[in-house]
Amino acid sequence: MPIEIATALAHRAVLSLGKEKRDSFKIIAAGRVDSPEKAFKLELLGADGVMLGTAALNALGCINVNLCHKDCPTAIAAVPRSPDGERKKALDVDISKQRAGNYYNGFVRTLADIHAAFGFSTAAEAVGRSDLLLAHGMSDSLVSLLSIDRDPGSAVFTIPISLNTKYSAKRLKELAESGHYVVASMGRTTDLDEP
């Protein structure tokens, strides 16, 4: 399920229990969050915070070849030892620390600038303010699920979701009609299975 839909549905579900319950419940959005703009969009849809998984790895130098569990080419994850017991490569901790620090500092500063541009003094003020989002190039089902208005022109914060398969279109229709979505997978694991 796309993170935008999951965030909006989770926010509405908890909010339906009452403001007091919503205030005591934190929604953390994760999955393809790599920019302050995406984080802000997710806050507007109801996220109290975001996780920066792959983006943080990229900041360290990850090149996304999906060999983390076998032989990470950038030495961030698994690095097998040679027959003599030495590591084939090692992560440059100083450079990685600098890269990650630059990424996080830039992310936080830019997100604070976005909040300020919208008149928010704290991130909490943005949570659930989906009235500030406008749909651009989305199906009616998706606009309805996200509870946002359709943009008559262009939008600054569009929500990019590809629905180019019959399966995705069917699942989106099911979700729009029933409010329930069957999650069949939490990610790609095929290369972990034994042949």
Image (cartoon, rainbow, N blue to C red):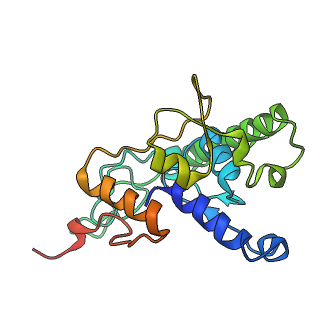
For residue 117, above or below residue 8: above
- Quarter placement of the C terminus: bottom left
In this view, which residue lies farthest toward the top? 153
Residue 101 vs residue 153, the one in the foreground:
153
For residue 22, above or below residue 88: below
Residue 4 vs residue 55, the one in the foreground:
4
In the image: residue 52, left or right of residue 140 = right
Position of residue 44 measured from the top left corner of the image (x, y, whole percent): 70, 49
Q: Is residue 88 visible?
A: no
Q: Residue at x 60, y 28 (%)?
A: 155
Position of residue 147 measured from the top left corner of the image (x, y, whole percent): 62, 51
Q: Residue at x 85, y 75 (%)?
A: 20
For residue 113, above or below residue 175: above
In this view, which residue lies farthest toward the right? 121
In this view, which residue lies farthest toward the front? 177
Q: Residue at x 87, y 36 (%)?
A: 119
Position of residue 78 measured from the top left corner of the image (x, y, whole percent): 36, 65
Position of residue 21 measured from the top left corner of the image (x, y, whole percent): 79, 77
Residue 21 vs residue 69, the one in the foreground:
21
- Quarter placement of the N terminus: bottom left
